[in-house]
Amino acid sequence: MLGTMGDVLYFAYGSNLDFDQMKGRCPSARSVGVAKLPGRRLAFTRWSGGRKGAVADAVADPAGEVWGVVYEITAEDLEVLDRCEGFTPGGSGNAYVREKCTVWLDGEEQRPVQAEVYFAVPEENPGLPSRDYRDQILRGARDWRLPPEYIARVLETIKAQ
């Protein structure tokens, strides 16, 4: 059963598509399935010194969609993920904010689930993502078998430095 005993659903669309990275951050992580976040589009709106480039965001776009994977993780692992994403609940100076959003499992509007999603706090002129970061997102997307059309139209067209 989804979300039992304090577990949380989390929607990943950036580097956390990489299951090895996700398991390293959140050992409890288990896949619920591929999903679509409607009304958003992938963008790179914030610089990360650790990544040496811009990092992923899902910005509002009524015609857009962002594909990713839903993980079920413990509340304790969500706290770890908050730190990894530069988010402190109620804090100021966050790199990301976390919001509960409706995502559609398998992209089907009839299969909505509520999941935690991180959105970047945008910066001016963040530059391009690094090639390694872009490739990590692409690998994760292919491993999870996100829709080939989304991979080709969106992810494979990401310009990197």
Image (cartoon, rainbow, N blue to C red):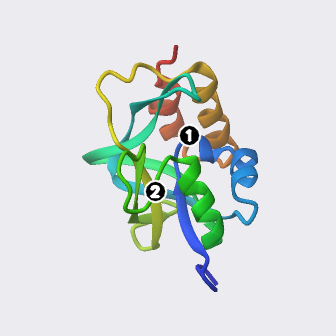
Q: Residue lying farthest top?
A: 161
Q: Amino acid at mark 2?
A: Thr
The quarter of the picture where residue 134 lies is top right
Q: Is residue 71 among the parts visible in the rendering?
A: no
Q: Which residue is mark 2?
A: 88
Task: Specify whether 57 is left or right of 7.
Answer: left
Q: Amino acid at mark 1?
A: Pro
Query: Which percent across, then down, holds residue 110?
Result: 42, 73
Query: Which percent across, then down, holds residue 15?
Result: 59, 40
Query: Is the residue 69 above or below the residue 94 in the image?
Result: below
Query: Which percent across, then down, holds residue 44?
Result: 41, 31
Q: Which residue is mark 1?
A: 148
Q: Earlier in the sequence, mark 2 or mark 1?
A: 2
Q: Residue lying farthest front?
A: 92
Which residue is depicted at the point 38% across and 24% down?
A: 126
Which residue is depicted at the point 37% across and 45% down?
A: 93
Task: Specify whether 134 is left or right of 157.
Answer: right
The residue closer to the viewer here, 13 or 23, is: 23
Distance from disc 2 to disc 1, alpha carbons, whole Å, reads 35 Å
Q: Is residue 10 among the parts visible in the rendering?
A: yes
The quarter of the picture where residue 4 lies is bottom right
Numbered circle sitting on residue 92 = none
Q: Residue lying farthest left?
A: 62
SS category of the residue bearing label 1: helix
Query: Is the residue 117 above or below the residue 47 in the image?
Result: below
